[in-house]
Image: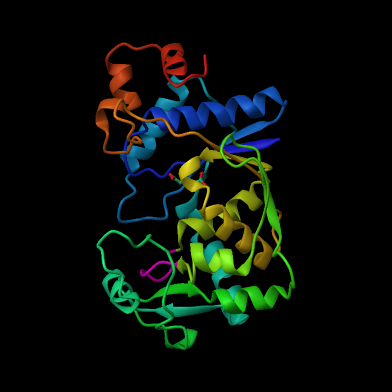
Amino acid sequence: MRTRFAPSPTGPLHLGHAYSAILAHDMARAAGGTFLLRIEDTDTARARPEWEALIYEDLHWLGLDWPEPVLRQSDHLARYDAALDDLGRRGLIFPCSCTRADIRAALAAPQEGAMPTEGPYPGTCRHRLLSDRRDGDALRLDLGRAVAALGEDGPIGGFTETGPNHPGHHPLSAAGLAALHGDAVLGRKEIGTVSYALASVLDDATQGITHIIRGADLYEITFLQVLLQRLLDLPTPVYHHHRLIRDENGKRLAKRDDARAIRTYRDDGVRPEEIRRMVGLA
Ligand code: GLU
């Protein structure tokens, strides 16, 4: 068993991250397997070296260890680009200049905030050729062509989930993917950069990850990631989406939630064993 914790260095780790990392670590250790750490720093506008340094400190303090060297995604941009090229040669991606506001207007979505970040896309730029990509254009997957390229009549593969919320086998369907993700963004606006969904899938394969332990907030993107695995001929790991750690008001913790940052607990003299107890892993 090979598991990983794959934080983005865009803020301090909080109790939710501690839960995720400890769980992935403990599950690998219990099975005699390996736990890896991966730094997902492709969002160059938000990733900071000081947050990365703090990730190493916090995780070591929690008692976790992992093999070195740690894979840092910013060192592998050419490899992600090659995957985009591959999809491009097969006619499965197109350049898109739509802003979120454009997309909302095209869908006539009435209320602000109803639009998921990478959600269903009205197809405005779908006719555009990759060779016409302009600076500032994102790259989107042409979902219809991607599904057709796989040439399946029935379900387009699927994945096994072992987490508490949706345990079992989950087949992918064209309609389900269209409703959840549509033509998802795979290449970010800044040329040479890649979306989290694609980079993460490529590295799970590169690192031979067999079990993905992560928060329930990433359950839905799994359907897109499994589609990408099918398109790129990569193995599909087992997924385990764990419960989210919430504050006393039931709100899930966010990076800006400094009060629950692991560093704050450390500074306050809390012991690592107490963190385990606080997240229910004692
Ligand atoms: N880098 C992602 C995050 O910080 C997690 C990726 C994953 O576990 O698949 O939310």
Quadrant housing residue 176? bottom right
Q: Main secondary structure of the magenta part?
A: loop
Asked if one can make out residue 69 in the rendered structure from this viewpoint, the answer is no
Residue 201 at what x, y percent from top left? 58, 55
| Residue 192 lies in the magenta stretch | yes
Q: Residue at x 51, y 54 (%)?
A: 221
| Residue 83 lies in the magenta stretch | no
Quadrant housing residue 224? bottom right
Judge whether 122 appears above or below 31 on screen: below
Q: Residue at x 34, y 31 (%)?
A: 250
Is 74 or 282 nearer to us in this picture? 282
Q: Residue at x 56, y 62 (%)?
A: 79
Residue 282 at what x, y percent from top left? 52, 14
Judge whether 201 appears above or below 82 on screen: above
Q: Is residue 209 left or right of residue 81?
A: right
Is 208 or 26 nearer to us in this picture? 26
Q: Is residue 232 left or right of residue 250?
A: right
Is 197 or 52 nearer to us in this picture? 197
Is 230 or 187 nearer to us in this picture? 230
Asked if one can make out residue 166 in the rendered structure from this viewpoint, the answer is yes
Judge whether 241 appears above or below 45 on screen: above
Question: How many numbered callouts?
Answer: 0
Highlighted range, magenta: 187-193
Residue 204 at what x, y percent from top left? 61, 49
Q: Locate the N terminus by quadrant.
A: top right
Q: Is residue 123 left or right of residue 247?
A: right
**Colour scheme in use:** rainbow
Residue 91 at what x, y percent from top left? 58, 82
